[in-house]
Amino acid sequence: MAAWSAACAHCGGHRPPAARWNEGPVCDPCYTAALQHRGRCELCGQTRRLVAPHGPHATTCADCAGIPATHQCTDCGIEDKLYERGRCGACALRRRTTDLLSAGTGRIPDQFSDLHAAITSTPSPRTALNGSARAPAPVCSPTWPPAGSP
Ligand SMILES: [Zn+2]
Ligand SMILES: [Zn+2]
Ligand SMILES: [Zn+2]
């Protein structure tokens, strides 16, 4: 069951590509890194995803490079790796938390507003998303007797 792999256009590693971009196949770590690569554009000075020249040393945003911007959050417009329905991690977390605490009505009851603020102000929405997506692991205690000495 050899997975199809190709030389990544960014790092040169032979891995199954996560995407095929203009420059060629891009492996998963490079794909994620490229989507999350934000900084000050050398040309317009805005904090944007830097896409050109492609790879980790990009200095220019999509607008300045004249290429279409992709993977933009439909809620806040940030360029990032997107989660649910085209939303960035922070917006996806806010939506999910709002749905949960408002029982689907979109209105957070007063007693939950602090909790909502605490959850959505996390500096790492990705971790929070991954945590809430997974059921908590059951706590199990060892039941068999400890191994005796030989
Ligand atoms: Zn790569
Ligand atoms: Zn720019
Ligand atoms: Zn967003």
Image: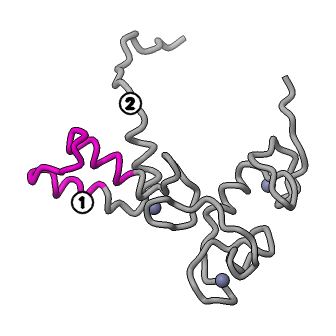
Q: Quadrant of ligand 1?
A: bottom right
- The residue at label 1 has a CB less than 8 Å from ligand 3: no
Q: Position of residue 68 (x, y in %)?
A: 70, 68
Disc 2 marks a residue whose amino acid type is Ala
Please identify the quarter of the rendering in which residue 143 is found: top left
Looking at the rendering, the stretch of residues picked out in magenta corresponds to 93-119
Query: Which residue is painted at 84% across and 51% down in the image?
Result: 25
Labelled disc at residue 117? 1
The residue closer to the viewer here, 82 or 12, is 82
Q: Position of residue 34 (x, y in %)?
A: 69, 62
Disc 1 marks a residue whose amino acid type is Ala
Q: Position of residue 51 (x, y in %)?
A: 72, 71
Q: How many marks?
A: 2
In the image: residue 70, left or right of residue 135: right
- The residue at label 2 has a CB less than 8 Å from ligand 3: no
Identify the mark nearer the N-term, 1 or 2: 1
Badge 1 density bin: few <14, some 14–19, many ≥20, Cα 10 Å: few
Instruction: Name the residue tied to disc 2.
Output: 135
Check if residue 44 falls in the magenta segment.
no
Front label number (1 vs 2): 1
The way the protein has been coloured in the rendering is one colour
Check if residue 112 falls in the magenta segment.
yes
Query: Which residue is painted at 59% across and 76% down in the image?
Result: 48
The residue closer to the viewer here, 86 or 150, is 86
Q: Is residue 138 above or below residue 91?
A: above
